[in-house]
Amino acid sequence: MAARLGTRRLLSTARPHSACQRSLPEPLTVTFSARHTAEIVYADGRARTVDTRSLRQREDAREWMRARAALDCTASEFACAAWDASPFRSRAALVAEKAARRPSRHVDTPATRFGAASEPLAVADYVRATGNAVEATGLWTDDAARLGASPDGVVVDASTGERGLLEVKCSFHRRRDRGLPPLDAAPRGFLAQIQGQLAIAELDWCDLALWIPKNAPDAPHLRVLRVRRDAAYWADLRPRLLDFAAEVAARRLEENL
């Protein structure tokens, strides 16, 4: 219940916060003091404490990226950190990036540009198809403020009122297909991210929404699968992430000697 109330509160203040932050200079450091709570120090010496769930990936991009870099690992990086399974970087490169506390490099490819442009369309189609409400949200952390997650939204189920998460995947490779095939199980490549988000947000389900443009009127361009939280999966994944974090800490110590 605490997580639900917290989400409502941060959403009610998100827009004034974003409007205010645009006048601030470049953030220099982000330090987490508690779950979802960080102090941001700016280039002019000003500092403020924020609930990181109020940070938006687009409107608050500088703070959002710095906050992610201050964590040991975030959900989109979990597969890479745990199993060296990422199309964008190697595990060794991720260790070096985290050891230097650098914000993740911006990946600018036709696929990432397609995803960024398509995500709002996909969310709107999801809302129309399901009747569920989607609330914007930002960066969540675990109790130790070491692991983080940035879901694509918090869902309020229209039938039950229950809250869950939304993860949108806009398929670049299928973007010209007539329609999408049935989605009976979550693709293996998405599981670490989804299960990590659910564990960190302490919610029971996430709607995985696969989307392509509507290229044919009689073919589905949106598939939605409700993925349930899997405690056994997280019990296997989390120690691997902590091993990754220990390796990052060792690298930092070595480079500071």
Image: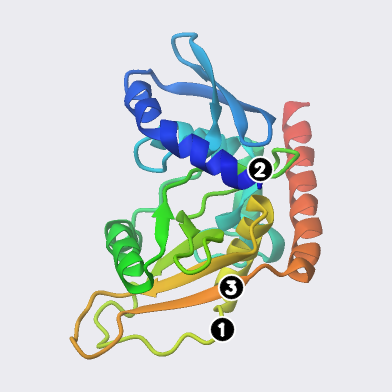
Distance from the alpha carbon under mark 3 to that under mark 1: 8 Å
Residue 238 showing in the rendered view: yes
**Residue type at the position of mark 3:** Val
What amino acid is found at the position of numbered circle 2 in the picture? Ala
Q: Which mark is residue 2?
A: 2
* Residue found 43% across the figure and 89% down from its top: 182
Image spot of residue 40 (x, y percent): 54, 22
Q: Which mark is residue 227?
A: 3
As drawn, 35 above or below 185: above
Give the quarter of the image for residue 220. Answer: bottom left
Q: Secondary structure at mark 3?
A: strand
Q: Which is closer to the viewer, label 3 or label 1?
A: 3
From what the image shows, is residue 60 above or below residue 125? above
Quarter of the image with the C terminus in it = top right
Comparing labels 2 and 3, the label whose residue is closer to the camera: 2
Single out the mark in the foreground, 1 or 2: 2
Q: Residue at x 35, y 21 (%)?
A: 20
Categorize mark 3 by other alpha carbons within 10 Å: few (<14), some (14-19), many (20+): many
- Could you say where residue 35 lies in the image, as x and y percent from the top left? 68, 36
Q: Earlier in the sequence, mark 3 or mark 1?
A: 1
Q: Secondary structure at mark 1?
A: loop
Q: Is residue 237 left or right of residue 110?
A: right
x and y percentages locating residue 45 in the rendered image: 49, 8
The residue wearing badge 1 is 185
Q: Residue at x 35, y 85 (%)?
A: 180
Counting residues from the N terminus, which is met first, the one under dot 2 or under dot 3?
2
**Cα separation between marks 2 and 3:** 22 Å
Mark 1 burial class by Cα count in 10 Å: few <14, some 14-19, many 20+ = few
Q: Nearer the viewer, residue 179 or 175?
A: 179
SS label for mark 2: helix
